[in-house]
Amino acid sequence: MKRHRPARATVLAFSLAAVVSLAFLACSGPKRENIEGAEGAPVILISIDTLRSDRLPIYGYNEVETPNLDAFARDAITFERVYSHTPLTLPSHASILSGILPDQHGVRDNVGYEVPSDLVAFLPRDLRAHGYTTGGAVSAYVMRSETGIANGFDFFDDDIPFQEGAAGGAMSRRGGETLEASRAWLRAAAAEKFFFFFHIYELHLPWEAPEPFASQFEDPYDAEVAAADAVVGELIEELKALGVYDEAIIVVLSDHGEGLRTHGYLEHGFFLYREDIQVPLLLKLPNQQQGGTRKVADVQLVDVYPTLAELVGLEVDETLPGCSLLRLPDCGGSDRVVYSESFYARLHFGWSDLASLVQGDYHYIDGPEPELYNLAEDPLETTNILREERRTYGALRKRLEDFNRQLDSPMEVDEQTRSRLAALGYLSSSATDLEGPLPDPKAEFQALQELNEARIFLDDGDYEQAATIARQSVDANPRMVDAWDILGSALEQQEQLDEALEAYQQAMEISGPRSELILAISRVQLELGRVEEALGGIELARQAGVVNPNSLRRIGLVLVEFGRLDEALSIVEEAAEDGTAESLNALGRVLSEADRQQEAIQTLNRSLAIDPDNARAQEYLGLVHLRLGDSEQAREYSERAVELDPTLADAWNNLGAALYFLGRPEEALQAWEEAVAQDPSQYETLFNIGIKAPELGRLDQARVALRRFIETAPERQYAADIEAARQLLRQHGG
């Protein structure tokens, strides 16, 4: 990905481009108001993700109560017209923290892009150089440190695991958890000059507000607004308890809004209407100076950096497009425009990107079907006045030429990585290579609705229906990356691995080498036994920070099935560095497969020390003791495992083996039948029943098990056993 630095303004002339440059230099123009106690003050930046301003009481909404934000507004300046530069979490926060527009920092989506480390400005990095200790805590996986957003933080908590096949919104945590994860750092930092970035995700789908909020509000979005307000209140109480609230500079804002079907679409990312980009912004100065006041001038989120920098005494780079909020309304004047963009539809669906400019009362949205709205007369943007206001339309369209609309490919690919991807068959075209007129996202709304329906079925576990709808979507719109991705996930869950691999590869053909897709392809290749290809892709995904301990555990256990014990052990040892019971279980299992049974017992006992009711550790200990020939211990552990979790088919299988060796074949057959009932793909168990049932004279039971084994067991893994089963079936008259 190319890195674009803002170009320094040089010659000023009376032209449209020069007016833009004058606006860029406005921070050194109008004198800001004198603020006492700002230099060296604590700085706290609170981001409430996906919060549109018109759903807060402080902006006139009456269907929800937000007592904490209301009280904070009495201590702060409320800015009434504030706009985001993109309705996507990572790119928007990159602009907030850097003061640089997305057309210059180059982050165009939540996936496949990284925040450059060499930006001319970046708030945590610059404050740290200014003597601040810096901390951050985020609530969404798309804000993980590997994206580059953590640059300059001394402390950054992003403990949200990657979940294969899950939608981005599912990879998040509640704001209360994020606050708890950061309290210790905050309490230690309060004695110093500190900056704290606190990000919460309550307003992002899925809306599942906890009680009492879920019952108090009919609208689930309102319930989440109330829940977010409570989290902000907890943080403010913490700051007050630490004695830093009064002296602190605190900003509360959102990165973007939410559709809420105002223009038909429930979520965000595709469109650039006011509901998508107009957000709240409140600024509390030391000792509540100017508290309770309101300002009406147009504000953009890139104004946050120069505001905070100027307050604490940082030099502000003259090329930054923003302006200190304390210089409004004079900064930029009536000529000021606010730029917004969205490449989401292009990157994920092969549709057109959009860009917009707000200038005073006018909002121009550029796309295949351009739109112009008068925000004062038509705040809900229902009437396109482009034909009536041709002069305004022409002027704003001309202004838009000053912004960089060139799209660089997702995921920076160096030559070494490119050659590795090519060798693995991964690299092809991408959404950046699309030519010709692209569909307007507005015209493709029905396809978007269908895709959301498919995602809901996928999340609910109805994989067959999800695959059916996703297949219809790709038939109608073959360049929809997300539809191919959903189709691949649904097919993978149904173990239709060849078809799943093809779907994932189609997604990569369109999108380019997104690390999440590389991991999905590698995962399926591994299941198909294409181990070398899979390992190459997994390593690339690990470099991108996608493969977390959960993924490593899964990959390691699959490698065991192919006899790749060295690679499996290396991978699960890395996973076990997180010290969780789940990772220790995986390590114990692989150690047992490597015939290091005593080390396996020690590792699994460490897991039980963390969680005594851990059924998986009990299951694996049962297996270890079977391998050591201690059938009684194997029985005890296996029985405990199925008591804790009756769905553990492998534990039932181990229990059957232990009972058989203890001379209790009737009970062994019962345990094996339970294993098959819990998991029809227990092929070894079916084979065991086919072999052992005749010893008790149960030929019908044996014949049924052998037939099922022959019909369902994968031939690539069980070819010899299938032939043996056929011979046994003939012997038993089957």
Image (cartoon, rainbow, N blue to C red):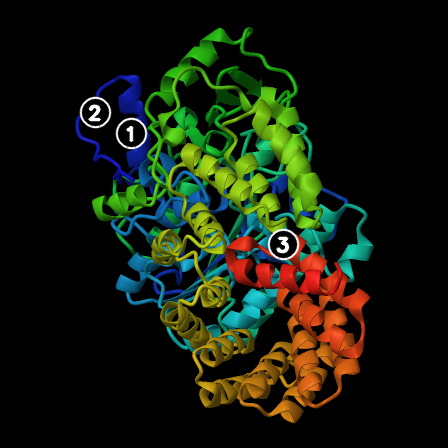
Which residue is disc 1 drawn over? 22
The amino acid type of the residue labelled 1 equals Leu
x, y percent for residue 414: 24, 45
Q: Residues within 10 Å of mark 1 (few under 14, many from 20)?
A: many
The residue depicted at 47 percent of the width and 75 percent of the height is: 590
**Disc 2 versus disc 3: distance between alpha carbons?**
46 Å
Ranked by sequence position, the earlier of labels 3 and 1 is 1
Quick check: 65 above or below 456?
Answer: below
Query: Relative to 38, is 589 on the left or the right?
Result: right
Which residue is disc 3 drawn over? 202
Q: Nearer the viewer, residue 117 or 639?
A: 639
- Looking at the rendered structure, the secondary structure element under dot 2 is loop
Quick check: 521 above or below 331?
Answer: below
Q: Residue furthest left?
A: 11
Which residue is disc 2 drawn over? 12
**Disc 3 versus disc 1: distance between alpha carbons?**
39 Å
The residue depicted at 52 percent of the width and 67 percent of the height is: 245
Q: Nearer the viewer, residue 458 or 298?
A: 458
> Which corner quadrant holds the C terminus?
bottom right
Ranked by sequence position, the earlier of labels 1 and 2 is 2
- Looking at the rendered structure, the secondary structure element under dot 1 is helix
Query: Relative to 17, is 686 on the left or the right?
Result: right
x, y percent for residue 477: 55, 25
x, y percent for residue 105: 33, 41
The answer to which image quadrant residue 215 occupies is: bottom right
- Find out whether the residues at labels 1 and 2 contact each other: C-beta distance under 8 Å: yes
The amino acid type of the residue labelled 3 equals Glu
